[in-house]
Image (tube, rainbow, N blue to C red):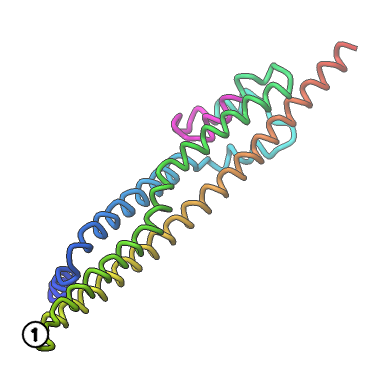
Amino acid sequence: MEHGLLESIAALRVGGAMVYPLLALAVLATVIFLDKCFVYWRRTRVPPVVVETVESFGFDWAELENELGTVDPRNYLVRFFGVILGNRTRPAWWVESRASDEARLIEQSLARWLWVLETIVTAAPLLGLLGTITGMIRSFHLFGDQGLVDPRGVTGGVAEALIATAVGLLIALAALFAFNFVSQWQTRFMDQMERFGTRLVDHIRLDEQGRRHADS
């Protein structure tokens, strides 16, 4: 294993100067992906008991508040629920407006730095292509008036071109999979939050109807 690692490092060195910015993009993509996984894992999960309460027909607001009190306050659904709970005595249209604003802020927070992953998907192959061009130029410069001057230099230039291209494509593919994975995770969470918001607003409408019947 150590021998294979040393061979990989040696191959990257042959790749020329373009390998270094490509490796920087790889590190940046890895950091963003791991950060997103941590954030999504810690701040988008809700205990099943809370889900069951929200999905039930006649839940009690105090019961829901107690259950939410056991969840990390940094959880995005707790933030979302808090806006609805804090405005539940107001008209349903008011609550929907405030909940929609909060959902938009949460979505922006979840999507932070995703544009970097998307940029890496495009930039990595281009940097690899640039490395290919510089490697081929280096090879062509080794041809003089008398023909081929340094066969080993030509081989090194071709190797530089191929390695830069391969590294760029590999990083782009990894960043693409990471971006799609996180985007799908975000989409599922936003759909879930929208469904929960609808359930809570429906409950507010039921409360409004109950108050109107009581007044009449």
Q: Which residue is mark 1?
A: 149
* Image side of residue 8 versus residue 82, left or right: left
Percent x, y of residue 172: 37, 63
Q: Which residues are magenta?
A: 68-83
Q: Nearer the viewer, residue 15 or 80?
A: 15
The quadrant of the image that shows the N terminus is bottom left
* Image side of residue 60 versus residue 184, left or right: right
Q: Nearer the viewer, residue 106 or 60?
A: 106
Q: Is residue 212 magenta?
A: no
Percent x, y of residue 214: 85, 14
Query: Which residue is situated farthest in the right direction here?
Result: 216
Q: Is residue 133 above or below residue 104?
A: below
Query: Which residue is situated farthest in the front direction here?
Result: 145
The quadrant of the image that shows the C terminus is top right
Q: Amino acid at mark 1?
A: Val
* Image side of residue 204 versus residue 25, left or right: right
**Displayed quadrant of residue 137:** bottom left
Q: Is residue 96 above or below residue 1?
A: above
Disc 1, SS: loop
**Which residue occupies 35% across, 62% down?**
126
